[in-house]
Each structure stands twice: as C-alpha cells, then as structure tokens.
Amino acid sequence: MAASAPKRRKEGRGGEGRSDDGLFDRELDHLPPEARWREWMHRVEATIFAAQEPVGREVLARIVGKSCSIDLLIDDIREELRGRPYDLVTVAGGWKHLTRPAYADAIRAAVGASERAVDLTQSEILVLMCIAYFQPITRSELSSFFGKEVSRDLIGALRGAKLIASGPRSPTPGAPYTYVTTREFLLEFGLDTLRDLPDFEALEDAGLLSKEKLLAGDIPSGLASGESDGEEEPESDVVEDSLS
C-alpha cells in the first residue's frame, strides 16, 4: 500500500504559514459597488457569528477593503436585524451577536441558565460595584468605605470569577495591591467600556443605590469573615487587560 503524499503547507510572505492570506480578495474590485458592500456585510456578520468572543475592529479590517467603513457596515447589519430576536452589540471593545433581553425567559425555559452567568451574593455585588466605580482601590480602602472589613475570601471569589484582578500597587504605606475590573467584567455585564457604567447619581435617583447608606456601613454582614487587618499578600497573577 503506497504511503500517502505529505500535505504541502503553503507559505505566505515571511514564511508564517499565512499563504492563502495573500490570495484573499479584500477589495472585491470586480464586483459592482452594491454587490461589494453586500459581500463585505456577509463577511463581517459571519465572522462575528462564528466567534466566541467579541470581535474587534482590527480583526474585521482583515476581511474588508481599505476604503470600507466598518462602522457603516455594522449599522447596515443592525438595520437588517431589526425585528429579529438577536442583534449585534458593542461589548468589551468589539462586536458580538447577542439575543435580545425580551427572549431571556424563553431561552432559560428551553436550555436553562447560561453557563457563563456568574452567581454573585449581594455582598459581592456591592464590593464589585465599588471596585468598578473607584478603581484602582485597595481592600483596606474598600473596608473603610463600607465601615466593615472586606474579607480576603470575598475578594478571592471575585478574582476566581475573573471579574477583578490585581492592579498597580498603592502609593500608601506598605504599597498594598489595588484591584481593578477585567475584560471579563465587561463581558459579563454587557459593557463596551467602563464609561458605560450607569451614572452614580442616576442610580441614587432611581433608588437602586444610596451613597449615604454605604458610607454608614448599612450593608450585609457577609462582607466580613473575622479576619484581622494586615498587609495584603503578594499576588502575581496581574491581568494585562485589566481596566483602570
């Protein structure tokens, strides 16, 4: 039995195995303008649909012509998706297909809760909220803000969920680590950037948040675990895409 011929891997410029990249027609000059635009729309939508994470502008630029406006493409795709149960949303610096909130109950009834969903306690939500609004912030500063000790276990739970990470060391005595939110935080809460966080005063006006109650320590007892104060233990797993 003859051995099969070895597969030949085409090499692109520079020998990086991206040969077919040089053959990929981005400009589509042979097509009339309307057909060219339609093909670009299909490419962008297909790429975003196939990706598990939000797709950034630099990725989409690899599949369309130099004169193509990605923002206008996205606008046209969104227009075509009007009335559909899903949309293209801007999240964590890219675009992603997401189902509309109105169909959340139907999806849960059919397939259950999303595996990505993070189940947070009220205490964890409060601490995460403060980190998001006041980052970079140390655990001691969080404890001072709430008037109660914020436990290492609670911080560890948020780190384990990849919602926060170590930030720069604080210039205060002892140089403790600060905490910042991560890209996973943006993904979990459907935010493009931290600028999309609800306005603090708007939350107060809506009765969802009371700065006075927080400063008075009117928070769940689950924040503390009876640990004594002390310097933060060094943590080396700083996430590069953490936001400040």
Image (cartoon, rainbow, N blue to C red):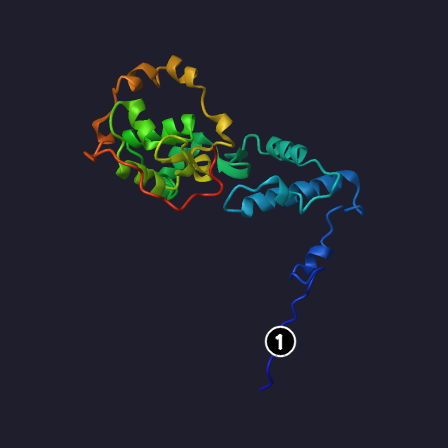
Q: Name the residue rendered at 42%, 25% in the picture.
A: 133
* Looking at the image, residue 25 lies above or below residue 187: below
> Seen in the image, is 124 located left or right of residue 34?
left
Image quarter (top left, top right, bottom left or bottom right) of the N terminus: bottom right
User: Quarter-wise, where is residue 113 in the image?
Assistant: top left
Q: Name the residue rendered at 27%, 31% in the picture.
A: 150
> Seen in the image, is 15 located left or right of residue 99?
right
Give the class, few, some or many, for how many residues have Cα within 10 Å of label 1's Cα (few <14, many ≥20). few
Coordinates of residue 203 in the picture (x, y in percent): 40, 18
**Viewer-side residue, 60 vs 125:** 125
Q: Which residue position holds label 1?
A: 6
**Viewer-side residue, 176 vs 85:** 176
- Say what amino acid the circle numbered 1 marks: Pro
**Can residue 126 be seen?**
no
* Looking at the image, residue 171 lies above or below residue 156: above
Q: Give the residue at the far top of this rendering.
A: 205
Coordinates of residue 18 in the picture (x, y in percent): 66, 59
